[in-house]
Amino acid sequence: MDDVQLRVRFAPSPTGGLHLGGVRTVLYNYLFAKQQRGKFIVRIEDTDQRRFVKGAEEYIFECLDWCGLSADESVQNGGPHGPYRQSERKEIYRAYALKLVENGHAYYAFDTPEALEEMREKLKAKGSESLMYDHHVRSEMKNSLSLSPEETQSLLKENIPYVIRIKANPGNTIILNDVIRGEIKFDSGNVDDKVLLKADGMPTYHLAVVVDDYLMKITHAFRGEEWLPSAPVHVMLWQYLFGLDAMPAWAHLPLILKPDGHGKLSKRDGDRLGFPVYAMDWKDPFSGEITKGFKELGFLPEAFLNLLAVLGWNDGSEQEIFSLEELIKKFSLERVHHAGAKFDYEKARWFNHEWIKKLPAKDLLPRVKPFMDIPNVEDFTDDYILSAIGMVKDRCTLLTDFNQQLGFLFHSPEKIDVGAINPKWNEIKNTFFLEFCQAIEEENISGEKMEEIFKRFCSNKNIKPGEVLLPLRIMLVGGKYGPGVFDIAGMIGSIETRNRILHTLQLITHE
Ligand code: GLU
């Protein structure tokens, strides 16, 4: 296999919002491909027309763009093995389904929905554990195994709707060597005769995934653990169609679990517990309901990828913060965990905070701008905004936090918490601030200079700086937060500093 190029794929069905588990699958595929100089393919699995949702495909690509995980081959970028949208490959699958029928591994089934319902009712009445269409019941149903070849041919000629089912025979052990989980054995007697080609001529996922992984020369297939129950059918199809030697190496990735560890994290958990589960905002085209995504809530893609990378993998050290470049170097399938990883939203926020601290202000500028709701922002230069971001970024957990943390550097505070000043106010402080204002009346007095004057006044008047620093902060910012007071004063300038002090002095009341 040495000269075979490594090829991996992400194969989403465009049915709605992109779950963070899906993005993690993309990420692991991407890391592996980049590390091994392979190719990363995105294939759209849209053969189930009932589940198809308009806009979902474009949305998936927008999410990947936001994350910076672009595909080497895809619906959008093309490639030598296209089309990359399964609904455009209908005829290809049909030929393989017919080949399976010819070789005795699949058969036509003409059962109506009513007949299938009746079959299930009968099985239920018998107390049967399984209600599946399988080797137990197939001889009682209307299919090319129970009918004579002539009867089958005449039904086909009459255009009676049919599906093609796999013939899953009992008595075999199906073995899957999973890169993460090792050898997994399935009893073929438990596998039902899954539909491969539907009455509308479309393949089911099972047939399409195997055919496309073969034709697209996929060497490694990573997907969520929830697909493990489908694996035996896929292994059978590989065996019947292409031989097991051609089969990609499989890796079923651990689930991302609810915060309490009980079951797979779902969109409903996010709604219930108040955190995002989708990469980006998703608007349901039927109900119009918008589900919030990580992007719009103010996460950086760097942080989002970092937190996903370590939900199910670590490099064996205590390191938690990884850039994409580092992940490409360090990622290894051997270190992907077997057990599911609990999602912890507070920890997710922590990652974002760390990344906001880590990235230079100039990298943050274009990401912060869309979140800034500052009406007069055009009056300020990018240099000013850059310094403002640099000043407050360590205090921001989400990009949405910048709005509050920066606002006072662009306009005087809308509300001033004088209630926090009043109780300890007195004439001495009043005079102190009036005199300080006189001393900084000129334009262009630097922050350092204002600090020096302020401290000198304190010592001359025997006032502890702490007693007047908090009021000054509230006067400039509106509340008890923000970066260094004189950094703020320096940014807004001495004239504005003076105006804000004088304005607040009018609001202060004291006994
Ligand atoms: N189309 C499947 C999905 O929606 C892909 C499963 C696989 O990767 O085999 O997740």
Image (spheres, rainbow, N blue to C red):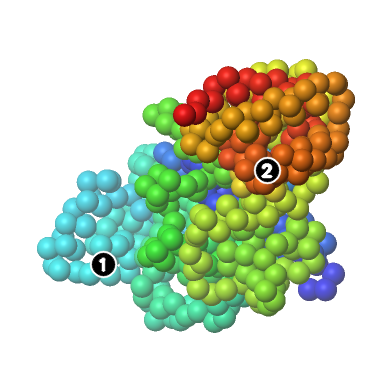
Quadrant location of residue 320?
A: bottom right
In whole angstroms, how far apart are the C-alphas of marks 1 and 2? 83 Å
| Residue in the foreground of this view, choosing between 19 and 252 | 19
| Residue in the foreground of this view, choosing between 340 and 14 | 340
| Residue in the foreground of this view, choosing between 68 and 29 | 68
The answer to whether one can see residue 322 in this image is: yes
The structure residue drawn at horizontal position 35% and vertical position 62%, both measured from the top left corner, is 145
Q: In the rendered view, does 401 fall on the left or right side of 457? A: left
Q: Secondary structure at mark 1?
A: loop
Q: Quadrant of the N terminus?
A: bottom right
The answer to whether one can see residue 94 in this image is: no
The structure residue drawn at horizontal position 18% and vertical position 63%, both measured from the top left corner, is 123
Q: Secondary structure at mark 2?
A: loop
The three-letter amino acid code for the residue at tag 2 is: Ile
Where residue 128 appears, as percent x and y from the top left, is 19, 69
**Which residue was labeled with disc 1?**
130
* Label 2 CB-ligand 1 distance < 8 A: no
Q: Nearer the viewer, mark 1 or mark 2?
A: 2
**Mark positioned earlier in the residue sequence (1 or 2):** 1
Where residue 405 appears, as percent x and y from the top left, is 64, 37
Per the rendering, the mark at residue 348 is: none
Q: For mark 1, does the 10 Å Cα neighbourhood hold few (<14), some (14 to 19), or many (20 or more) residues? A: few
The structure residue drawn at horizontal position 79% and vertical position 31%, both measured from the top left corner, is 491
Where residue 372 appears, as percent x and y from the top left, is 66, 29
Q: For mark 2, does the 10 Å Cα neighbourhood hold few (<14), some (14 to 19), or many (20 or more) residues? A: some
Per the rendering, the mark at residue 463 is: 2
